[in-house]
Amino acid sequence: MSRPALLVVAQSARSLATAAVRAGYAPIAVDFFADEDTRALALAAERVSGGLRCGFRRAALMPAIETALRAAAVEPVGIVLGSGFEDRTRLVASLAARWSLLGCPAEVVRAVNDPFRLAEACRIDGIPHPEVRRDVPTEGEWLVRRRGAAGGGHIRPIAAGEPVPTGHVVMRRVPGRPVSAAVLADGGRAEVFAFAEQILAPADEAPFRFAGVAGPVRLPATVEQGMRHAADKLAARFGLKGLASLDAMVDGNDWWLLEVNPRPGASLDALDHMDAPLLTAHISAVAGRILLPRAVDATIRATMVVYASVDSSVTVGPKWPDWVLDRPGAGARIEARAPIATITAAAERLEDIEGLLTTRARELETVLRGNAT
């Protein structure tokens, strides 16, 4: 019996395609890269023109999806969306009108990504959340961030008196380290099934640029309890469905919720090694039944995006190590500050993970230099 086809669309759809295969689906992938391993996993993989800087545009996305569907020659049972739609809710609605949307509808995505609505919900439900404003106060440390954006590259410090760009919001800076809670929600309640450490790759122009996650990990008991409370309250208030993640800053026993990602997130690769496939749990939760996956061992797994320091072109298809994901094919052009690929590591201690990732990032850059101009 052939596997049912599933349409997966994201800025990079490889992790969703991998999760779909684990869950017994045949993925049809559409994204900005169409990397080698995405093509190997999918019935069809199509690259959307424009790239990360432009984001998803209806005029480019819809034809790319139709091309992929013609190549796959099968109708998908539904569509799962990943990153890239946080500020494209009209596009989410258009996709939901054409295919069965297995995830949060457009109105939920719009509401939970509104920083002022989220802050007000947190105030009402007793969830710690940094103050958000439209201007910069004269006292304290503040960050400016673009509304409906993902990846952290849009966040930077802002000084008193500095104008706030259109489409941006100011948030009080809080101390600590970035973490996330992986959540399954059924539209009325939610359960956290894992916590993860976030990994940053700071750059001069993007000091909070996101690179990856490591998990599952344990956080202080009071933090875990608080984040579980937050997930359940916010799922009920906003109607979250399926896999989602809560991003937070943790400082000892103190913590602050920063944002909610109402979709399968960056922790998918690191956490999809449990007793049930995460995409199976996602689709079940969207349908109203939470199936909580459990860890099968004590291994911590991590993924980290490695960014290019200079412009380059891959002239020969390299023999990538098996710990490299999102593998660019021969002829791929990689701009400075753009992702080269994703590296993985696994260990029982977080400090060992960090060492492995550092070593492998250097090795990846060596592989690229040997196959690039």
Image (spheres, rainbow, N blue to C red):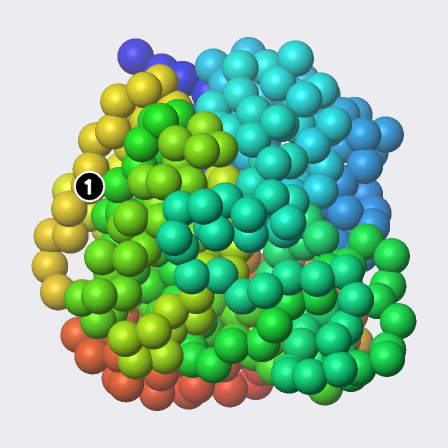
Residue type (three-letter) at the residue carrying disc 1:
Pro
| Label 1 sits on residue | 293
**Image point 56% across, 59% down: which residue?**
327
Q: Residue 305 in the image: state x and y as whole percent.
A: 53, 68
Task: Left or right? Give the position of 233 relative to 221.
Answer: right
Q: Residue furthest left?
A: 297
Nearer to the camera, 157 or 284 = 157
Q: Residue 266: percent from the left, percent from the top?
A: 46, 55
Quarter that holds the C terminus: bottom right
| Residue at the image position 15 percent from the left and 46 percent from the top | 294
Q: Is residue 57 visible?
A: yes
Look at the picture and state if 337 lies above or below 100.
below
Q: Quadrant of residue 39?
A: top right
- Is residue 115 rendered to the left or right of residue 216? right
Q: Quadrant of residue 198?
A: bottom left
- Residue 156 visible at all: no
**Image x and y of residue 234, in percent:** 42, 40
Compared with residue 186, is residue 227 higher up or lower down, i.e. above or below? below
- Disc 1 is placed on an element classified as loop
Q: Residues within 10 Å of mark 1 (few under 14, many from 20)?
A: many
Q: Count the marks.
A: 1
Residue positioned 36% across, 79% down in the render: 251
Of residue 327 and residue 210, the one placed in the foreground of this image is: 210
Examine the rendered structure and indicate whether residue 140 appears above or below residue 332. below
Q: Give the residue drawn at x 24%, y 69%.
A: 219
In this image, 107 relative to 288: left or right?
right
**Viewer-side residue, 79 vs 373:** 79
Residue 202: % across, % down: 61, 82
The quadrant of the picture occupied by the N terminus is top left
